[in-house]
Amino acid sequence: MFNLIRKDIVLQKKTLAVLFLGLCVYLTLDVSPIWVGIAFSIAIFMNAISIDEKSSIHMLLNSLPYTRKEIVSSKYIVVVLFTCMVAAAIFIANFIIHRELTIWKDILLMVAIVMTAASFMLPFCYKFKSNYLLNASIVAFGLYMLTVNFIVQNLNDQIREFIHMLLTLQNTSLYLIVAISIITLYGCSWLLSIRIYRNKVF
């Protein structure tokens, strides 16, 4: 399975270099590191999925001495690795550019949101294809814009207040509960993806 993980990293060497350069540019613009990290983490692992979606890659992977469980598991490990790489890049770049340390709660929130998003996106991609996810995202964004403009006009402010509340909480046990919940969700997503991919015909 190590070779499967290595394959995803090697195939994205150039993409990772470009994205990390772009990440540094965004950080110089004083954009929130949380949202930059979320966007770049999702972009990286979605690119890894889209590469594997080619039928020739699917057939090649299934002809190698790896079980379908190992193929799916490697992708879930890669998502965590890529997210940690982005978090580390943000931490280092933020220190170099702004001479300040990124708050650990910001990093944890970024990782939590990415893992939660991946928990829903990965099974969807194994069941269908990533281009369907793109279509669904466009529809969701359209609904969000309608909601913000016509139904709940202060929704953005409410989201910002909620995130600020999360970042200012001092309750360690609550952080632990949230962490366990996200890990459980990620584990359930992993099991669901294994089941979907095991029954898939190429």
Image: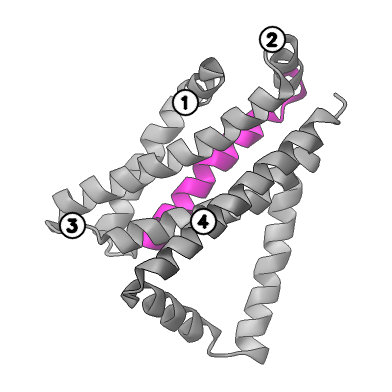
Per the picture, the main secondary structure of the magenta-coloured stretch is helix
Q: At numbered mark 4, what does the secondary structure look like: helix, strand or loop?
A: helix
Callout 1 touching callout 2 (CB < 8 Å): no
Residues shaded magenta: 34-56
Q: Give the distance between the C-alpha atoms of the residues marked 3 and 1, in whole angstroms.
A: 27 Å
Which quarter of the rendered picture does the C terminus lie within? Answer: top right
Q: Which circle's residue, 3 or 4, is located before the other in the chain?
A: 3
The disc placed on residue 64 is 2
Q: Who's the residue at 25% across and 62% down the image? A: 103
Crowd class of label 2 (few under 14; some 14 to 19; many from 20; radius 10 Å) = few
Q: At numbered mark 1, what does the secondary structure look like: helix, strand or loop?
A: helix
Q: Give the distance between the C-alpha atoms of the residues marked 3 and 4, in whole angstroms.
A: 26 Å
Judging by the rendered image, the residue that carries numbered circle 4 is: 180
Q: Who's the residue at 29% across and 50% down the image? A: 90
Residue 35 falls inside the magenta stretch: yes
Q: Nearer the viewer, mark 1 or mark 2?
A: 2
